[in-house]
Amino acid sequence: MRTRKKPWTGRELSENRGVINEPGELRGKWKEYFGNNNPIHLEIGCGKGKFLAAAASAFPNINYIGLERDPVILAAAARLNRVTAGAPAAYIVSDVENLPELFVTGEIQALYIQFCDPWPNKKKWAKRRLTHARFLNIYRELGIERIYFKTDDRPLFEFSMEQLSENGWIIRNVSRNLHTVPQDPRFITEYESKFAAQGLPIYKLEAYSGPPGGEKVERRNSQDEEPDKADDVHAQEKQDI
Ligand SMILES: C[S@@+](CC[C@H](N)C(=O)[O-])C[C@H]1O[C@@H](n2cnc3c(N)ncnc32)[C@H](O)[C@@H]1O
């Protein structure tokens, strides 16, 4: 994603109260920051924040955090949340690699990975994929209970299924063509809109932390014949509330 700096980028980063400039200082104190005991959901690579702003408005009893390594893009996400008067969410400029410096174990309940870079040269770049085992280990060590993953990239999707499964995550609600059933437009991400408009299939799965080592791994709908209903992605949110 290439985004040019806007006249308001610097101001948004310094003055928007949702932008956390020293996020490491909140490590272990995110509940205090939000001022409640609600679950915390994190989107990594949140882009310009369309999904996050909508989710924060729709599910006020969940605390949302967006993490994005590009400050210009993060500024756009924080701005969107502010101007759409959605429920407040927190925005962090950082790289996924830094998650252990930002959160303690058990602080984040759910993770969204949506249309992350596919890093197509598997041999050379697989380790950079956000569903590579080295990242899955970080997510597990942080006690993340579930991951919602969407992509337009089939090789990345199959790779992610393998990595998750081999690392003991329980995969559920798989779809290899999510948009064959109507989706709630609020939760369609920016990239998802673009790819779906091009007629590309959208792949989706949910992964639940299971026993380490891969035993008892359960797969459901893994062949995708049954795409999800529009609101399935947020079924767990509703349970959390
Ligand atoms: C293709 S965009 C998708 C944005 C959004 N999730 C969507 O679906 O519209 C991927 C975003 O992830 C960010 N990103 C990629 N790798 C990252 C990393 N290691 N840490 C943090 N952000 C990352 C990029 O800067 C980019 O904004």
Image (cartoon, rainbow, N blue to C red):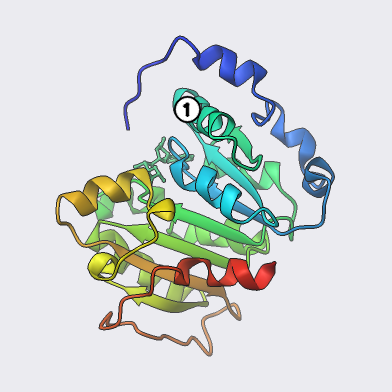
The secondary structure type at the circle numbered 1 is helix
- Can you see residue 130? no
Report the residue marked by disc 1: 76
Specify the farthest residue to the top. 7
How far from the left and from the top, in percent, is residue 168? 52, 77
In the displayed structure image, the side of residue 101 where residue 190 appears, left or right: left
Question: Which amino acid type is shown beneath numbered disc 1?
Answer: Ala
How far from the left and from the top, in percent, is residue 29? 82, 45
In the picture, residue 21 is in which quadrant?
Answer: top right
Between 98 and 20, the one lying in front of the other is: 20
In the image, what residue occupies the spot 50% across and 32% down? 80
How far from the left and from the top, in percent, is residue 97? 55, 43
Between 63 and 111, the one lying in front of the other is: 63
Q: Quadrant of the C terminus?
A: bottom right
Q: Is residue 169 above or below residue 126?
A: below
Q: Where does ligand 1 appear, by image quarter? A: top left
Specify the farthest residue to the front. 85
How far from the left and from the top, in percent, is residue 62? 67, 56
